Image (spheres, rainbow, N blue to C red):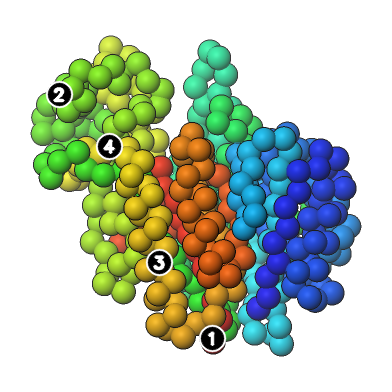
């Protein structure tokens, strides 16, 4: 398998799409590519970008991707203007195979959308990675109404329910901007909203995945969820969650923040020893407080009564430490397994743009030192294996390195 990366900040979308496909293809050294992953900011004319890319790579290339708050490559980190980036993938001597699938019923039923994706894939020999992308936003936000998001746990549940074989799942809930505006996805020749798409890579390839969160527990104390409905959390240990967070915050006015900037809810999962380079925590950000302060609103509706949680705090030092240590561990594991890195994908929480790209620059430096091509995007939700299955993550970075036998 070969890979090529391209970046553009050209405002003319058709020209940008054509340039991206041509430049990424040229880096592979092959005249035809099998897959083009294409991402761009909301300032872009999506359909024109797609048409330009299609004109350059021909009718048989699988094209997936869509909105990104910003893009990351080996040379640039860009979230201003009209940034766009592409990754070209192609098999050499049929060493890898690619399958893709799309569902357009995500907004009405995420579980059934996941089932449709899983059913669409034929059993593959040596499945290496299933890349999953979906539209994070059902209804965009405005000055008067918060955005309504599409939950990812039902999508993953549906996918697991119908997928015919075991394969690592990683990917992202796409986001167009930090105001939760309308999101667009690419699939083949369409640029549309409310899609769920997936790419299955199989054959002589392996994927190494690290989920790196940016929060640490406030203390070792655990709480039991005693009242919750979907993403609305009311009580912990039979006490109002708002009072518990008041005590922990030290009277910081967290109730007026949307989302809450300092505190979050974390669940710890057991992690297998052979995947010790991923965080054991799944963090749920708090998007705000319910009317009358009766509870808090979480970003995802996947917690339940009886579950043990910890109160987490966002931690810039933790972000950098995780990026450094876990990326180095991943690279050491690849070397020990006698694998050759082909390309890296990085899905980074868009909220971490406010950290001045510090952690993305660190990832960039480490992968440049290892001479690994990089395509990253700023996302709404990150997806990676944590524990026994893949889960959606908040305030995290997910690094995927695709390799071939050395």
Pair 4/3: label in front: 3
Locate residue 251 relative to residue 157 in the image: left or right. Answer: left
Which is more toward the observer, 327 or 67? 327
Locate residue 11 relative to residue 359 in the image: left or right. Answer: right
Q: Residues within 10 Å of mark 2 (few under 14, many from 20)?
A: few
Task: Check the picture and name the quadrant holding the C terminus.
Answer: bottom right
The disc label shown at residue 328, or none: 3
Q: Distance from label 3 to label 1 (Cα)?
A: 19 Å
Q: Are marks 4 and 3 in contact (CB under 8 Å)?
A: no
Q: Indicate the secondary structure of the residue bearing disc 2.
A: helix
Q: Residues within 10 Å of mark 4 (few under 14, many from 20)?
A: many
Which is more toward the observer, 173 or 330? 330
Q: How many marks?
A: 4
Q: Are marks 4 and 1 in contact (CB under 8 Å)?
A: no
Give the mark, 3 or 1, whose residue is nearer the N terminus.
3
Give the mark, 2 or 3, whose residue is nearer the N terminus.
2
Q: Indicate the secondary structure of the residue bearing disc 3.
A: helix
Give the mark, 4 or 1, whose residue is nearer the N terminus.
4
The disc label shown at residue 313, or none: 4
Instruction: Provide residue 111's location: percent of width, then percent of height.
Output: 47, 50
Q: Residues within 10 Å of mark 3 (few under 14, many from 20)?
A: some
- Quarter of the view holding residue 120: bottom right
Pair 3/1: label in front: 3
Q: Indicate the secondary structure of the residue bearing disc 4.
A: strand
Which residue corresponds to the image point at 55% horizontal and 75% vertical from the top-left? 341
Q: Distance from label 4 to label 3 (Cα)?
A: 24 Å
Which residue carries the number 2 mark?
247
- Quarter of the view holding residue 229: top left
Instruction: Provide residue 247's location: percent of width, then percent of height.
Output: 15, 23
Q: Residues within 10 Å of mark 1 (few under 14, many from 20)?
A: few
Which residue carries the number 1 mark?
405
Give the mark, 4 or 3, whose residue is nearer the N terminus.
4
């Amino acid at each position: 398998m070969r890979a090529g990366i391209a970046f553009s900040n050209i405002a003319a979308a058709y020209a940008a799409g054509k340039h991206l496909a041509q430049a990424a293809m040229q880096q592979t050294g092959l005249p035809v590519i099998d897959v083009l992953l294409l991402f761009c900011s909301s300032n872009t004319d999506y359909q024109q970008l797609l048409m330009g890319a299609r004109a350059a790579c021909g009718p048989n290339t699988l094209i997936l991707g869509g909105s990104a708050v910003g893009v990351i490559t080996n040379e640039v980190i860009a979230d201003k203007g009209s940034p766009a980036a592409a990754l070209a993938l192609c098999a050499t001597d049929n060493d890898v195979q690619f399958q893709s699938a799309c569902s357009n019923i995500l907004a009405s039923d995420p579980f059934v959308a996941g089932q449709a994706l899983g059913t669409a894939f034929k059993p593959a020999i040596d499945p290496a990675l299933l890349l999953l992308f979906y539209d994070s936003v059902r209804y965009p936000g405005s000055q008067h109404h918060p955005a309504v998001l599409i939950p990812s746990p039902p999508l993953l549940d549906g996918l697991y329910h119908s997928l015919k074989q075991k394969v690592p799942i990683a990917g992202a809930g796409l986001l167009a901007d930090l105001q939760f505006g309308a999101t667009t996805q690419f699939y083949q020749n369409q640029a549309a909203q409310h899609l769920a798409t997936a790419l299955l890579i199989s054959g002589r390839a392996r994927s190494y995945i690290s989920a790196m969160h940016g929060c640490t527990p406030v203390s070792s104390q655990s709480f039991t969820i005693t009242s919750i409905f979907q993403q609305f959390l009311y009580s912990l240990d039979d006490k109002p969650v708002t009072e518990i967070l008041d005590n922990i915050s030290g009277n910081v006015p967290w109730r007026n923040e949307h989302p809450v900037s300092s505190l979050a809810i974390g669940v710890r999962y057991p992690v297998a020893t052979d995947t010790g380079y991923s965080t054991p925590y799944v963090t749920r950000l708090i998007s705000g407080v319910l009317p009358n302060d009766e509870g808090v609103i979480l970003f995802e509706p996947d917690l339940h009564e009886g579950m043990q949680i910890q109160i987490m705090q966002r931690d810039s030092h933790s972000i950098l430490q995780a990026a450094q240590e876990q990326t180095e561990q991943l690279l050491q594991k690849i070397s020990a397994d006698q694998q050759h890195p082909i390309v890296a994908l990085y899905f980074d929480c868009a909220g971490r743009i406010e950290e001045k790209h510090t952690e993305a620059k660190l990832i960039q430096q480490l992968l440049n030192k290892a001479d690994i091509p990089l395509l990253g995007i700023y996302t709404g939700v990150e997806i990676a294996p944590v524990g026994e299955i893949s889960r959606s993550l908040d305030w995290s970075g997910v690094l995927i390195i695709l390799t071939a036998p050395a």
